[in-house]
Image (spheres, rainbow, N blue to C red):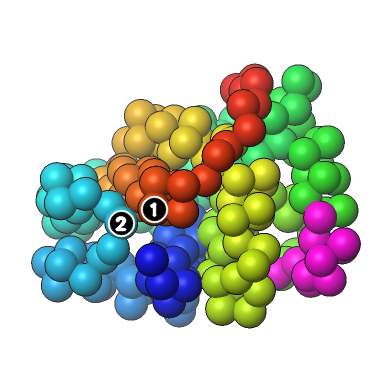
Amino acid sequence: MSAESISLTSKVLGAMLYYPPASEEVQPLIALLKTSDWGPLWPFATAEIKAQAAELFAQIDEAEESAGQAYQRLFIGPYALPAPPWGSVYLDKESVVFGDSTLALRQWMRENHIEPLLTQAEPEDHIGLLLMMCAWLAENSPSLLNEFMAQHLLPWSGRYLELLQQKSEHPLYQGVALLAESTLSGWQQQLALKIPSADLYF
């Protein structure tokens, strides 16, 4: 499995789960995902999941709610988020942001001299940021990638992506969640990662 293929998939998924749909980072990705061109080139996810995701992406323009409205509802608020995108909400007993798992991630990054990719004051354990961090590590510090995934991403990402599929109610984010879940599962299998068991609280 090449670092290049991890970098590619995690950049796309990270951007889709971090930036608004109208942003310059995401607009061209949505345009690509609405075509069928990406499927044969996408590593890790199963053919069946890619077909299901492609079907969902083809419905984006017919959705009652715009992709921008769905992003606001799922990632910003003002109401309670149906699938909060921060790891500590799932890993901390109090289900809070900036919880112990965020501090552990921050400490790990400090010890390994990694600067956070933050554009604003927010927790470092946002799913989109962590996926983009996978891309950065694959390109710059591949020896740290397995540890990072096993300790800071994979213990909770499956639960988050399951919730996003169930509760997003928009074909763009249903498709992204489905594709991400299958892709991360593919990473885990191909890298033979052992994920420490974690209690999830959300």
For badge 1, the amino acid type reads Gln
The residue that disc 1 covers is: 190
Q: Quadrant of residue 1?
A: bottom left
Q: Residue at x 65, y 54 (%)?
A: 148
Q: Nearer the viewer, mark 1 or mark 2?
A: 1
Q: Which residues are magenta?
A: 108-117
Depth check, front residue: 122 or 69: 122
Relative placement, left or right, of 137 versus 13 is right
Which of pointers 1 and 2 lies earlier in the amino acid sequence?
Answer: 2
Q: Residue at x 77, y 50 (%)?
A: 105
Do residues under tags 1 and 2 come within 8 Å of each other at their CB atoms? yes
Quadrant of the image containing the C terminus: top right
Percent from the top left, x then y, of residue 104? 82, 45
Percent from the top left, x then y, of residue 11? 47, 69
Depth check, front residue: 63 or 34: 34
Q: Quadrant of residue 108?
A: bottom right
Q: Residue at x 44, y 66 (%)?
A: 6
Dot 2 falls on a residue whose secondary structure is loop
The residue that disc 2 covers is: 44
